[in-house]
Amino acid sequence: MRPTTVLLIAPAFPEKTFWNNKAVCRVAGARHTAIPLGLLTVAALLPPDWQCRLIDLNCRELTDADIDAADLVMTGGMNIQRPATLAVVARVQRRGKPVVVGGPDATSEPDVYEGADFLVEGEAEGILGALVAAWEAGQRSGRFAAEKFKADVTTSPVPRYDLLRRADYLYYAVQFSRGCPFTCEFCDIIELFGRRPRVKTPEQVLRELDTLYESGFRGHVDFVDDNFIGNKKAVKAFLPHLVAWQRARGYPLVFSTEASINLADDDELLALMREAGFFVVFVGIESPDARTLAAMGKKQNTRRALSDSIARIHAAGLFVIAGFIVGFDSEEAAVGRYMVEAIEEAAIPVAMVGLLAALPNTQLTARLRQEGRLFPVEWQLRMLTAGEGGDQCTLGLNFTTRRPRREVLADYLEVVERLYTPSAFFGRIERASREYDCFSPPRPLDPAAPAGFLGIGAGDWAELRRLLWHFLRERPGALRHVVGLLYRCARTNPGALRHVATQAAFYLHLGPFSRFVSSAIRRQISDIDGGRWQAPVPEPAWSHPAA
Ligand code: SF4
């Protein structure tokens, strides 16, 4: 029998989103930020004689000939990719080919994808074998659901990195763990992967890194774990292996990840991460208000001075990208002002501030539905497909807010408009740059490159020149801020130049993006003021089994 030919399609992210950092990609000569790790893992789980091809719609066009050449198409992604995923399903079916949909959004809200030929709910390791067996038995449609939180990640194969075009991406990715022990009400991670983090073995992760290294890859790898330190004992057992791996090869890689703020409380963990080559961590801070944090179930963020915690992470040589949310029930008026003050005080240059969005299958969604406040799913889909698309920065609040909607939007607008003026943004980078202890980090990137001026390699200087050229061309008004910042950093803390340049590059994206968000929110406010906003009729109150 001829082996099955599979086309894996990564759906596009909306053009206008915080995460779609196209401007930074341009500086680095890439087309997209992150690789589609889920689809690469799926490809590795398929029978070895099946022939796989990947098209990432964030980087390449899809042609009818691509679809026609495949026996089976597989796709799926996150909630924000929903319209693009549904468009892929429709297009593939128009060509008469069967399509499989899986991934986080299909798992959270499978009924949205009921038109797909095959639907896979849950983690691929636990269920893909059943799909393959059904396909090989001649079945051409079906619905498969993995048992929740049961996939044994220690059996997960090395993702098929060979399917990627390396130059397309800003960074590569690996995964160490799935799941998080915390209970944040708005979070879908704990519903998708459970509250008991499951981890790969150190040997397994190092095998993945070996694969990248042997393919010639050098540079930035993201640990895509939603909370890298969810199982501290396991991560502390893993990191010494990673340190040894990096040392033995002259530090060919640098790492980023996401972690909860309690990372700041653990000096041993911070030291290990620094020694392993981590340079940035995304931390979900969400709100400056302790009452709101407690109400959302994020107790790990309370009982701490935010600025002290961030300073401790900075002192360990990592810079912080932080997530904040506006729109919680317990917020008080002027939350926008308090949020800006907290971000400024903690010197967090890159802050992802979004509107609260009730994601499918979360405790928040269950509660809002029970309270009769949740907007119907069609409303969200209509918003996602309207205009240029967007993310939770423009399309959140898919429910009846406790405070008047206008007030919440005005608070949010204040944050967006104050945080991303050039003087505020570069001022925060400058203050943070004094806190990084980067004098003796492991030498990252190409170990063969000469250290060069200020301990920075020739390749890095070329990147710096490219960065300045992009500012000159795209944001000339901000150029003097960048030059001044780099000059002062070179004099006072030259070891932090790489951090400073990387964060400055974000402005190429965040400057224009914040203006896009600001005008979208101003339009929403003006619709309310002009009586043009019509609140959708919420879903009927319904008691969700998880509530
Ligand atoms: S700490 Fe992060 S990953 Fe964990 S439950 Fe909260 S939001 Fe989700």
Image: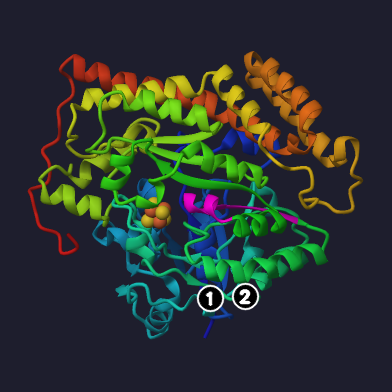
Residue drawn at the location 34% of the way across and 75% of the way down: 146
* Nearer to me, 547 or 478: 547
The amino acid marked with disc number 2 is Gln
In percent of width and height, residue 191 lies at: 32, 62
The residue beneath circle 1 is 156
In percent of width and height, residue 480 lies at: 70, 15
Question: Splitting the image into 4 quarters, where does residue 188 fall?
Answer: bottom left
Say which quadrant the C terminus sits in: bottom left
Residue drawn at the location 63% of the way across and 13% of the way down: 477
- Asked whether disc 2 touches disc 1, contact meaning CB atoms under 8 Å apart, the reply is yes
The residue beneath circle 2 is 204
Which stretch is magenta?
A: 253-266
Mark 2 or mark 1, which is nearer to you? 2
Q: Which mark is residue 440?
A: none
Q: Secondary structure at mark 1?
A: loop
In percent of width and height, residue 523 lies at: 30, 19
